């Protein structure tokens, strides 16, 4: 009968006793691997969305700075309007009629517009993904938004402009 007794090492049901911990370990390892992959995908999507929003705002401010700079007196406009014989098509004539009025001759206004342009010009904005570069980018955009508000008040325009309502609310396309 000594041969009928089984030692604990030979017990066929021993593996069933540890089945729960085995499934737990397998599930945990699989979940961790799936979580790493999902985290990278979600992180990339979030990064693209936030980057798009930030550069949309930077581009909006840059465009407004260019328009304001071209509206300054003695900037971007010729001293005399072109002769009618120089204009070849009716679309160019219509474009002349829709010219924006010049801004008042104000040195402070010119300084604010120049500063706004310097803050948001695309050549000097860093595209690196370091903490320092991102913080500098965010700071420049925030300061540019402040300058834009000052210029809007000096010029008498509506805050944010009509077309930028969606950009300010953080919605994406």
Image (cartoon, rainbow, N blue to C red):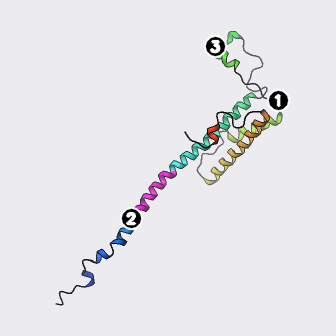
* In the depicted structure, whether residue 50 falls above or below residue 33: above
Please identify the quadrant where the N terminus is shown.
bottom left
Question: Looking at the image, is mark 2 or mark 1 nearer the viewer?
Answer: 2
Sequence-wise, the earlier of marks 2 and 3 is 2
Count residues near mark 2 (Cα–Cα under 10 Å), then give few for <14, some for 14-19, many for 20+: few
In the image, is 173 to the left or to the right of 148?
left
Residue 157 drawn at (x, y percent): 74, 33
Q: Earlier in the sequence, mark 1 or mark 3?
A: 3
Image quarter where the C terminus lies is: top right
| Mark number displayed over residue 147 | none
Local crowd size for mark 1, using a 10 Å CA cut-off: few (<14), some (14–19), many (≥20): few
Q: Residue tagged by mark 3? A: 90
Which residue is identified by label 2? Answer: 27
Q: What's the magenta region?
A: 29-43
Q: Where does label 1 land, which residue?
A: 105
**Residue 33 magenta-drawn?**
yes
Crowd band around label 3 with a 10 angstrom C-alpha radius: few (<14), some (14–19), many (20+): few
Image: 108 above or below 85: below
Q: Mark 2 and 3 residues: CB-CB less than 8 Å, in contact?
A: no
* Residue situated furthest top in the rendering: 85
Residue at 77% over, 26% down = 102
The quarter of the displayed image where residue 88 is located: top right
The tally of labels here is 3
Q: Residue at x 67, y 13 (%)?
A: 87
């Amino acid at each position: 009968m000594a041969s009928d007794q089984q030692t604990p090492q030979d017990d066929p049901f021993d593996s069933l006793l540890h089945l729960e911990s085995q499934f737990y370990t397998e599930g945990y390892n699989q979940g961790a691997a799936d979580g790493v992959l999902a985290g990278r995908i979600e992180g990339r999507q979030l990064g693209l969305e936030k980057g798009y929003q930030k550069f949309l705002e930077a581009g909006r401010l840059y465009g407004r700075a260019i328009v304001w700079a071209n509206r300054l007196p003695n900037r971007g406009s010729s001293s005399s309007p072109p002769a009618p014989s120089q204009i070849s098509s009716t679309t160019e004539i219509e474009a002349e009629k829709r010219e924006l009025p010049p801004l008042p001759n104000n040195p402070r206004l010119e300084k604010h517009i120049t500063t706004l342009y310097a803050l948001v010009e695309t050549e000097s904005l860093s595209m690196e993904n370091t903490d320092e570069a991102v913080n500098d980018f965010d700071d420049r955009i925030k300061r540019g938004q402040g300058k834009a508000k000052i210029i809007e008040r000096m010029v008498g325009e509506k805050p944010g402009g009509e077309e930028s309502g969606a950009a300010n609310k953080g919605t994406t396309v």
